[in-house]
Each structure stands twice: as structure tokens, then as C-alpha cells.
Amino acid sequence: MSNLKAESIEPIKDFNLHFNKILNKIPTASQPSEEVRSKRYITALPSNIAIFVDRANKTTLVENMKEAIAVEKHIMALEKKNMIEEQNSKKVSFKEDPKKKQSKYPFDLEGLQKDLKTMSNEMVDIKKQVAETSSKKPYRPFKRNPSTDSKPPNAITNAELEEEEEIATEEHTNEE
């Protein structure tokens, strides 16, 4: 009985039947007290239900079983409500604006003329912006610096060469 745990997907009514079957297998002389049975029942419940059943502070196993069923019903109702709200919030409806005048023909001449005029104005604006932001030289050709010739790397780095030159010049000045 102490190893019994309710599955999270198992309905509480089924778990109650299973719990009672195991409890009835225990000989009457060896059965635990009502308080111990209630505590073991509550600890075997899924945690989301056990919290509420324990808070109800019922004294008998039967009362705790009824409380667990009631809590399960409340949880299922809340989950169902949340699911419905999620579905309703995801619905998108497109309503046509009644203020807009609908023409008989989808390609009326006036509408096309207005669209063409706004598009041409936008193109002129874009061309002006491009002309203002671009410089006289849109790009500079890449020129290689003549002082940086590509040489294969030497075993001695430039820093090592500089140190050797400094040491040599110091020795030369010390000799004089």
C-alpha cells in the first residue's frame, strides 16, 4: 500500500477502486488506523490533487476519496474552460470595412489610376533618397599598399628581430 501511486492520467474513481482492493486484501487485524489510511491515500494521489485534499482536512478515508473526486472535477472544468478560451482567442475573423465604397468591378479605372499615381510618387521619393545618400564615388577601388608585400612567415617574428637589433645596438654602444 505504501508503494501505490496514482497515475496522473488515471481517473480518481479508478484509483479509489484500486486503493480499496489493496486495502481489503490486508487482514482486518493488521489494517492500519483510519488516520494512517487517509494519510497514505493522500500521499498516493497526484500532487496537484493531493494538495487540495490535504487542505480540506477530512478525517476519514471515505471523505478524502469524495474530496479527491470533487477536486478532480474542478481541475477538469478549469482545464476545459482554458482550452475553450484558447480556441476562442485563436479565432481570427476578417470583416470588411463598411466605410469603404465597394465598386462593382474589382479593377475599376479610377482605383487603378490612384494606385499607379501613389506608386510612381513613392518611386520618385526613393530615387531622391538614393541620390541624396550616395556620394560621387559609389565605391573605391581596392589598392594594395606597396609597403605590405606578401611574404611567407619566418620562424623569427618581428618582435624577436627588434629585440635582437636593440641588444646589438646596446652592445655596440657599450664597446665604444
Image: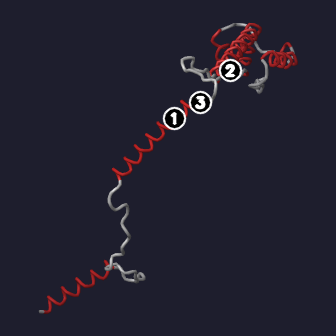
What distance separates the C-alpha of mark 1 from that of mark 2? 44 Å
Which kind of residue does numbered mark 1 sit on?
Asp
Residue furthest bottom in the image:
176
Answer with left or right where residue 90 lies relative to residue 70. Answer: left
Name the quadrant containing residue 143.
bottom left
Q: Nearer the viewer, mark 1 or mark 3?
A: 3
Q: Residue furthest front?
A: 109
Density class for disc 2 (Cα within 10 Å; few <14, some 14-19, many ≥20) is few
Q: Is residue 30 visible?
A: no
Residue 21 lies left or right of residue 35; in this view the side is right
| Residue type beneath disc 3 | Asp
Tell us which disc is closer to us: 2 or 3.
3
Residue that carries the numbered disc 2 in the rendered image = 83
Closer to the chain start, of discs 1 and 3, is: 3
Task: Return the residue nearer the eye: 127 or 54.
Answer: 127
Instruction: Measuring from the top left, give residue 40's x and y in whole percent.
Output: 73, 19
Query: Which residue, given by chain and number where applicable, does mark 1 sit on?
Result: 115
Near-viewer residue (164 or 58): 164
At a point 64% along the width and 23% down the height, the residue shown is 104
As drawn, is 22 to the left or to the right of 121? right
Up-down: is 163 above or below 38? below
Of residues 150 and 33, the one nearer the viewer is: 150
Residue 27, image x, y percentages: 87, 16
Q: Which residue is mark 3?
A: 108
Mark 3, Cα crowd under 10 Å, few <14 / some 14-19 / many 20+, is few
Residue in the picture at 11% in, 92% down: 176
- Is label 1 in contact with label 3 (beta carbons under 8 Å)? no
